Amino acid sequence: MIIDTDKYISQQRPIWDEFERMLRLIEDNARTNFDLRQIQRLRYLQDVVSADLTRLRTFSAEPATTNYLESLVARGFSSIHENRSLSRLKFNPFKVLVEFAITVRRHSRLFYFVTATMFVGCILGGGIVAFFPEHKEIIMPFSHLLGDPSERVEMEEDAENSTHVSGHQSSFSATLMANNIRVAIFALTVGILYGVFTVVLVFYNGLILGAVAVDYILAGETTFLLGWLLPHGSVEIPAILFAAQGGLLIARTLIVKDGRLNLTARLKKNSRDIVMLIGGVVLLLVWAGIIEAFLSQYHEPVIPYSAKIAFGLLQLAALAGFIVMAGRTKKGARQ
């Protein structure tokens, strides 16, 4: 069949223009959301433009037109099949944190479970130190925690007077960040073993935390304890819990069937949430490492304990408020 190429191009041009306008909307604004009718129209236009490209190639139309249609089809395929939900967050840490907060709320039951697990570990660790102090060395993983808390407090405060920390903050901060991020990623990735080791890791960290806390409280060093742990712990401990939440999300994806979705489809469905959790955790732990190196390690008389405790409590309240409120619309559509 012979067609009038010029007439055909003139007739189809409005369709090509409409398709290009819709693509430009997607490309210029990553948050463009089409309703079902618009999505169906976009897919229809892509099919028409693809068919036009094939037809004009067959009849050796002018190269400029076929090149234009090839570009249009390629842009359409990229825009329709691209995972924009992740790419739009790539270079914006604040948006990552907002999506992170939304993800934490979406899987809040997992967060409550890992929090309860750590709390049980805290109670057990504290109970062992309180009632069986001779077994403290079994729980404490670090040698500097095995001695008398009061002696350590005296040593730390004297060391601050000699400013022994000065000049080492940068390297210490980097070491802390790397270690905490490694622990968090481990807590998340071992979720692939059905969450068993994630739960064990959270429980063990709670065991240590409870043992240390009770040891210092019984020695009458509660103020030092709070001033030492709150500035960085108010971010670091929640970050570890969020990472464990991600680990249990992986485990739940592996174990719990979701309708007729197979394992690959379930992993694809939850992959964005897993990425959001680990991305937010890394940002939080970087901040916690900075705070631990530049604030937590300084004690009285350099920095008053009251100031450090107040900072830690305000930071914890700010983090909790952000997790609860970030990304909510007036109708709560994104909760």
Image (cartoon, helix red, strand yellow):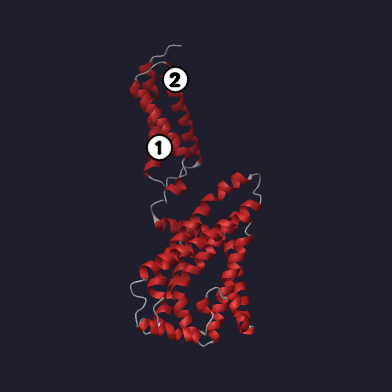
> Could you tell me residue 123's position as x and y percent?
61, 76
For the residue pair 224 and 271, the one nearer the viewer reads as 224
Q: CA distance from mark 2 to mark 1?
A: 22 Å
Describe residue 227's horizontal placement relative to residue 219 as left or right: left
Callout 2 amino acid: Arg
Callout 2: SS: helix
For the residue pair 91 and 95, the one nearer the viewer reads as 91
Residue that sits furthest to the top in the current view: 1
- Is disc 1 surrounded by few (<14), some (14 to 19) or many (20+) residues within 10 Å? some
- Give the answer, above or below, for where 303 lies relative to 232: below
> Could you tell me residue 218's position as x and y percent?
55, 86
Find disc 1 in the rendering and name its residue.
23
- Residue in the image at 64% along x and 83% along y: 132
Callout 1 amino acid: Leu
> Could you tell me residue 302's position as x and y percent?
35, 82
Look at the image and tell me whether residue 221 can be seen: no
The reply to whether the C-beta atoms of the residues labelled 2 and 1 are less than 8 Å apart is: no
Residue that sits furthest to the front in the current view: 143
- Residue in the image at 52% along x and 59% along y: 185
Q: Which numbered disc flags the more N-terminal residue, 2 or 1?
A: 1
- Give the answer, above or below, for where 201 lies relative to 96: below
> Could you tell me residue 212's position as x and y percent?
54, 78
- Residue in the image at 41% along x and 19% along y: 57
Describe residue 318's horizontal placement relative to residue 210 as left or right: left
Q: Which dot marks residue 55?
A: 2
Callout 1: SS: helix
- Residue in the image at 54% along x and 65% along y: 241
